[in-house]
Image (cartoon, rainbow, N blue to C red):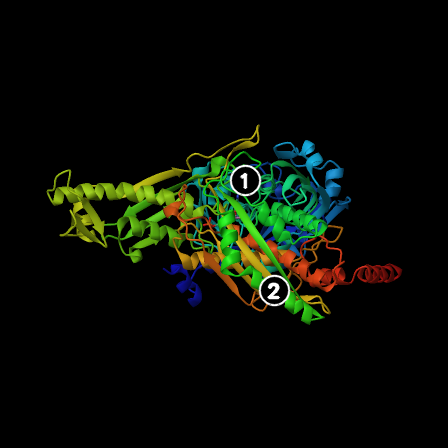
Amino acid sequence: MKNYDWIQHVRGESLFVDDITPPEGTLHAAVFSSPIAHGKIINLDLEIAKKLNDVIEIFTAKDIPGENQIGAIIPDEQLLADGILDFCGQPIAIVVAKDNFSAHQAVKQIKLEFQEYSAVTDAREAFQKGQLIIPPQTFSLGDADSAWKDCDLIVEGTAESGGQEHIYLETQGSFAFPVEGGGIKIISSTQAPTTVQRAAARILNLPMNKVEVDVLRLGGGFGGKEDQATAWACMTALAAFKLKRPVKIILNRQEDIRMTGKRHPYSSDFKIGLTKEGKILAYEVTFYQNAGAAADLATAILDRTLFHCTNSYFIPNVKATAYCCKTNLPPNTAFRGFGGPQGMFVIESAIYKAAEKLGVDPMVIQEKNLLSEDDEFPYGQKTKYCMARPSWKKAIGKYNLGEMKNQVEKFNLENKIFKKGLALMPICFGISFTNTMLNQANALVHVYTDGSIGISTGAIEMGQGVNMKLRQVAATIFSVDISRVKIETTNTSRAANTSATAASSGADLNGKAVQIACNNILERLIKSAQQELKSNETDQIEVKDEIVYLNGNQTELTWNILVQKSYAKRTSLSSQAHYATPGIHFDKSKVKGEPFAYHVYGTAIIQVTVDCLRGTYEIDFVKVVHDFGKSMNPIIDRSQAEGAIMQGIGWMTIEEVIYTKYGKLLTDSMSTYKVPDVYFTPKEIEVDFLDNPNPSAAIFNSKAIGEPPLMYGIGIYFSLCNAIKAFRSNAEIKNSAPMTNEKLLLMLYEPAGQNLKRKLKNKMTVK
Ligand code: MTE
Ligand code: HPA
Ligand code: MOS
C-alpha cells in the first residue's frame, strides 16, 4: 500500500502554492521588516519606494480595515507593526509590485527611522525582568517537598536545549484574489485553514463566510505552518482586498528563516532524588521557555512540556513548573513534538547525571523506572495498555543489547582516538490536542453516479500521508478499489471550523469522521440493495470488492449498478459527519484529567562513533521497537518514523540556531544552519513494529505516528556523552543541546578547551 502522492512528487507533477498558474494581472508582494530586535518606529518613509517603476502600492498598519491582530490564542501579535518593534524581521509594510523582483527592490528603498531599546534574547533574563506571557503553570503529583528526605541520592543541575528551524521544502507563501460580493479567496500553505480564515476575516473586518481558504498540499509543515502561515495569508488577503486584484507572496529561503519562529529553546533546572538502587522517588523541574516576542502557540507548547516532563517513567512525587518568557526574538512556534521533546530532554539529562553519581549505566535507572500498567501521570491520567516495558524488553532482546555493549567495550579498549557510545531512549507521547476542544473533525463524502468517490475533510496533506490513509478508510468501508477515491483540497467551505492538522492526530480525527460519513452512505446503499434484491430484514447484505453479496452469495449487483439504482430511487449519496474524541477531559483549575485518547510508546537504541581528535562523529545505527498499533500503512508509517528520528537527531546534534545578543539571527541560510543530509544519516535504521492493535479511539486500531518517533533522537545526545566518557572518564558532561562538533571537542579536552576558549576570547576583545 504505497503513498499515492509519491508518484506525482517524483515526477515533479505535484502542485504547491507557487506552482499554481496565476491569473493575468497577478501582483507580487514582498515584506519590509524590522531591522532591530527592540525599539520604536519614529518615522517610516515610503516615498522613494512608492515611486519606483512597477510598484503598485505599499500597505502599512493604517491600511487595515479590521483589527491589526493575528494572535490565535492570545491577541498579542500585530500583522504589521505600527509603534513598538519587538523582534528582528517583524513585518512593518507590504510592498505590492508587478513582479517579485520589483517588489524586493522597493523594499530596499523604504527608510525607517527608529529609536532602539535594549533587547532581551534569553529566557531567564526575561523571567528576571518579569516578562511572562502567562502566569507560571504547575503540574504536581504526590509530595515532592517531603520526598527528598527518603532519597539516598539527590542530584541537581541545569539543561539547555536549542531552537530548531523547520526547513520545510516549500517556504511560506500565499495567493489571494477578490471574489464576487466583496469576499476573498486565499490559497495558502497552511496546516490550519480555519485559523487563516478567522485571522483574515478579523483583519479585513469581514464575516468568516466571506473568506474562503483552500489548501491543496504543503511541501512540509512540521508545525511551522500551524500558526505561522497566517501572517502571509493575511498580507495577500489585505492587498488583494484593497487593490481588487490577485496578489501572491512567496518568501525566499532567507526571508523565511529570518522572519518565522522556530522550536522554542528551553533553559531548565532539575532536582532528582533516588534510592541507592536507582528508583526515582522525586523530581522537581523548572522550565524557562523562550517564547519570543508573542504568544503564538507557546502556551499550548508549554502545557505539553509539562505533560511529558516525566517521559516514560513513573515518578511518584513530581513538581514541575513552567514559565512562558517573552523575549525579543521572532515568536517561536510549533515544531514536531510540540514542547514534549524539550521536557523529555531534561528528565533524560537528570537521569544521566544521577547515573554518573550512582556509578551505574543510565539504562539501569531508565529500565527500573519505566511505566507499568495503571501508573499515574502527573496530570492524573493512568496508563492503559502500557507498552513502555514490552517495547524496552523487545528492543534489548531482539537487538541483543548485551552483545552490543560487549562490542562497544571491545572497540573502545582497542581504539585510542575513536570511541563508541551507546544509549537507550524510551519514549511515551500522549495523543490528542491537549486543549480538549480541538479534538474534533468533520468530513463530507460524495459518491458520484459513476461510483467514484470524493472526500473533503479538514486534514492537510504535508507529506505525512494523511490523504492516503483517508482514502484507505473510504476504500475499506465501501470495499471498492482505492483508485475510486479522491481526496479533495482542504477547503473552509466544505470543511468548516476545523482544527489544525497537528498533534499527530490528523488521520485519527479526520479518518474517524470519514468513517462515520461513509458508513452513513453505506447503510443507505445496503437498504437500497435490499429493495433491489427483494430480500427480507434478516438477510445479510454486504458489499465486497465492488460486488453485492446476499447471504454470502454473489448477486448481479455491482458497486456501479447499486450506486446508479440508488440514485434513481432518489437516495442521498452524500454525507457530512462530525467526530469528537470520546472520553477525554481536562480540568485546568485542578490540573488533572484524562487529556489523551491514548499514549504511544517505544524504545530506541542509538550507537555513535566519535573521532576524538576532530570532535566529529558518525551514527552507527538507530534500532527501534515502536508501538504503531495496527499500522494502517506500514510504508508510510515506517517513513514517518525514519524522518522523525532524523529530525530529532538533527535537533540534538548539528542544528544550531544562533542569535547575536542584539537579537539578529546569524544562522539564516542553508550554509550556516546545518540540517542532516544523506551522509549524516545513520548507517543503519531498523524499525521494528510492535504489532499491537490499539483498542483506544483511533482509526482502524492504528496509532498516531507523526511526532512520537522524533523523541528517539534525544538518545543520541547521551550516546555522544558516553563516547566522550570513554575517551576521558572524568570529562564534565554538560546538558546543553545541540552537541555540535565544536561543543563536543571542548568537552573532550576541558579544562584545556576552556582555556583555549578564554584565550581566543581575550584575543578577540583586544582587537
Ligand atoms: N511528515 C512530513 N513529511 N511533513 C510534515 O510536515 N509534520 C509532522 C508529522 N509528519 C510532517 C510530517 C507533524 S509536526 C505532525 S503534527 C504530523 O505529521 C501531522 O500529521 P498527522 O496528524 O496526519 O500525523
Ligand atoms: N499539539 C499540537 N498542536 C497543538 C496542540 C497540541 O497539543 N494544541 C494546540 N495546537
Ligand atoms: Mo505538529 S508540531 O503538532 O504540527
Kind of residue sitting beneath label 2? Asn
Crowd band around label 1 with a 10 angstrom C-alpha radius: few (<14), some (14–19), many (20+): many
Asked if residue 632 lies left or right of residue 719, the reply is: left
Pick out the residue farthest to the left. Answer: 534
Q: Position of residue 614 (x, y in %)?
A: 72, 69
Asked if residue 450 lies left or right of residue 362, the reply is: left
Instruction: Say whether residue 88 is visible.
Output: no
Confirm or reject: label 2 Cβ below 8 Å from ligand 1. Answer: no
Quickly name the residue at label 2.
Answer: 406
Q: Position of residue 747 (x, y in %)?
A: 75, 59
Q: Position of residue 391 (x, y in %)?
A: 50, 52
Pick out the residue farthest to the top. Answer: 589
- Residue shown at 38% from the left, 60% from the top: 4
Dot 2 and dot 1 residues touching (CB under 8 Å): no
Q: Secondary structure at mark 1?
A: helix
Instruction: Say whether residue 431 is visible.
Output: yes
Kind of residue sitting beneath label 1? Ile
Residue 185 badge: none
Q: Dividing the image into 4 quarters, which one contains the N terminus?
A: bottom left
- Residue shown at 63% from the left, 36% from the top: 318
Q: State which quadrant residue 326 falls in.
A: top right
Pick out the residue farthest to the front. Answer: 277
Crowd band around label 2 with a 10 angstrom C-alpha radius: few (<14), some (14–19), many (20+): few
Q: State which quadrant residue 129 falls in.
A: top right
397 in relation to 571, above or below: below
Q: Secondary structure at mark 2?
A: helix
Q: Nearer the viewer, residue 724 or 562?
A: 724
Q: Label 2, label 1: how many angstroms apart (C-alpha)?
A: 63 Å
Q: State which quadrant residue 480 falls in.
A: bottom left
Q: Position of residue 8 (x, y in %)?
A: 40, 63
Quickly name the residue at label 1.
Answer: 203
